Image (cartoon, helix red, strand yellow):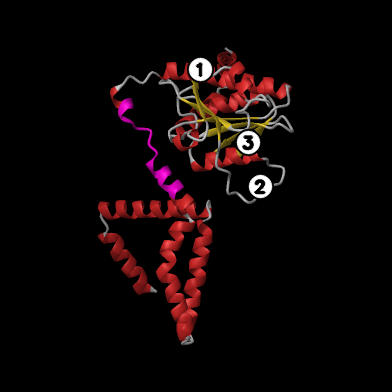
Amino acid sequence: MAAFFQNVKLVIEQMGINDIIDIAIVAFLIYKLITFVRDSRVQLLVKGIIVIAAAYAVSLLLNLQMMTSVVQIIIQNAVIAALIVFQPEIRNALERMGRSRLSVASIFSRDDKSVERGEMLSTISSVVEAYRLLQIKKMGALVVFEREVLLSEITKTGTVVDARPSASLLSNIFFNKAALHDGAVVIRNNRVHAAGCILPLTHNTELGVSVGTRHRAALGISENSDAVAVVLSEETGLLSVAVGGELKRFATPAELTEELMRVLLPMDENDEDKSGFIGRIKRLFKKKSNNKTGDTQEQSSDREEADE
């Protein structure tokens, strides 16, 4: 045991900055790989590999020649089979790796966040008002906000509209006698880009029977991209938002507006990272100083902007 600790001490003493960076990068990649395996069907592949490895070890130990030959054939073709079976998961992982907020346009053009916020607020207001009208008429709806990952393959399945979003336009699209009411509306760059689009259904097998096709489609598109899907249930009238494969339900249009503003609105230049460490520290000091008036005024101004 003493020799082991002596060897560890020697390794630590010989480590340099490059070695530390190397270890940190490898540890991060291993962590992301474990997270990806845990959150997808790839864990089934890992379990299968463990079973095959155990069978191969047993066959070698007991000198089972036929069993060894069969397992060797399986191992030789396992890579190709895995690529075919788990193609959606591999594609999803590559798409996540390729997402980047940095673009050529953002480097050479003036990034006016206030204009973008105003357009997004108007779009959110139109969608929520349309959902309020459809709630009264007991009709369903499914709107998808496209973000960084383009949904070109999805929009090809529908009809191109390319119009400014409005409550009347969206409520007419989802009117139960309209030709496009069964599909989804895709909003791109704060415009109704396409309607009647067909979305991929989620692969989540743990959903209950009460989760309908619209909700499964919303979860599916949020799993395969960074899009935000908003669902209005025709049966219950409940509002739902799907982001990153998770579904949140809301009872009122006001709650839906608040969630869409939180998820979709870009931050102003003067805004702080409210979800980060600095934001938490500042909120802690605000609570200690009992400065609640400013927070109340900010919340009321946000609601006034949403109503406009």
Labels 1 and 2 touching (C-beta < 8 A): no
Q: Looking at the figure, which quarter contains the N terminus?
A: bottom left
Residue at left offset 50%, top offset 75%: 54
Q: Nearer the viewer, residue 164 or 239?
A: 164
Q: Which of 191 and 40 is in front in this view?
A: 191
Residue 3 is one of the magenta-drawn residues = no
Q: Nearer the viewer, residue 48 or 30?
A: 48
Q: Name the residue under label 3.
A: 248
Q: Distance between the residues labelled 2 and 3?
A: 13 Å
Q: Distance between the residues labelled 1 and 3?
A: 27 Å
Q: Name the residue under label 1.
A: 164
Task: Judge depth for marks 1 and 2 and give the one in front.
Answer: 1
Crowdedness near tag 3: few (<14), some (14–19) or many (≥20) residues, C-alpha within 10 Å: few
Q: Position of residue 155 (x, y in %)?
A: 49, 33
Q: Looking at the figure, which quarter contains the C terminus?
A: top right
Q: Mark 2 points at which residue?
A: 207
Labels 2 and 3 touching (C-beta < 8 A): no
Q: Where is residue 107 in the image (x, y as percent from the top left)?
A: 30, 26
Of labels 1 and 3, earlier in sequence is 1
Q: Distance between the residues labelled 1 and 2?
A: 35 Å
- Secondary structure found at label 3: strand
- Secondary structure found at label 2: loop
What amino acid type should be assigned to the residue bearing mark 2? Answer: Leu
Residue 98's image quarter?
top left
Labels 1 and 3 touching (C-beta < 8 A): no
Left or right: where does residue 273 sit relative to residue 200? left
Q: Is the magenta stretch mostly helix, strand or loop?
A: helix
Residue at left offset 45%, top offset 62%: 81
- Relative to 215, residue 165 above or below: above
- Secondary structure found at label 1: loop
Residue extent of the magenta highlight = 91-106
Q: Position of residue 237 (x, y in %)?
A: 72, 29
